[in-house]
Image (spheres, rainbow, N blue to C red):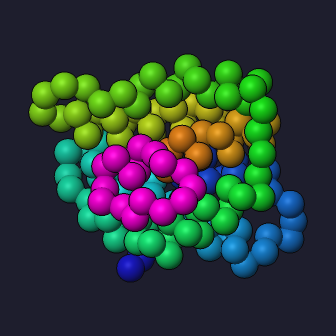
Amino acid sequence: MPRPPRHPFTIAVRQALRRPLDLAAQRYLRLLDRRFAALARIAAGAEARAVEAGMRPQERALARRFFARRSWHDGDENLVRGYLDRWEKGPGPGGEARRARGVLEGASALSGIGPPPGALWFFLWEMESVLAGLFEADKGDGPC
């Protein structure tokens, strides 16, 4: 599978991580770009499979391990909350495309303001729930 282009949010996450990046962080960043590419396909009205979006159990486990080492506080959550309203699944046809567009728009806007790392982690945590709602996903412990 060809590597998707880097999303601005993935670049922001990469910059927020300590250097040198460990293998797990590198794997998560590649997964994150795949997820943004799948969201872009859905936002454009196309279909994306769960495997393309990195929603297999081992990929979800990778994301959960990534979040286990990250933290955020109420200020980070407050910064992100304005973008979360865009993710609400609207009624009628096209709800999934609107939801995917909302995630992409929020990620682009948030990455453009140079938020603190905690805001990035919280956004990604919430994005896990959106992805689980768009794709069949394992319902193990962790986000969603």
Q: Is residue 53 visible?
A: no
User: Where's residue 73, x and y in %?
Assistant: 78, 32
Quadrant in which the N terminus appears: bottom left
Whether residue 122 is visible here, answered yes or no, is: yes
Farthest-out residue, right: 19
Q: Is residue 94 above or below residue 30?
A: above
Task: Find out whether residue 139 is within the magenta segment.
Answer: yes
Q: Residue at x 50, y 71 (%)?
A: 59
The residue depicted at 56 percent of the width and 69 percent of the height is: 61
The overriding secondary structure of the stretch rendered in magenta is loop
Q: Which residues are magenta?
A: 129-144
The count of marks equals 0
Residue 32 in percent (x, y) is at 54, 59
107 to 51, vertically: above or below: above
Closer to us: 76 or 114: 76
Q: Please state the horizontal and vertical placement of residue 45, each as a whole percent of the image.
A: 20, 45
In the image, residue 3 above or below residue 139: below
Q: Is residue 133 left or right of residue 4?
A: left
In the image shown, does 103 or 75 lie closer to the viewer?
75
- Furthest residue to the left? 93
Q: Residue at 19% x, 25% y: name it.
A: 91
Q: Is residue 73 left or right of residue 55?
A: right
- The image shows residue 79, relative to residue 128, as above or below, that is above
| Rendered location of residue 39, percent (x, y) | 37, 50
Determine the residue positioned at 71% across, 68% down.
25
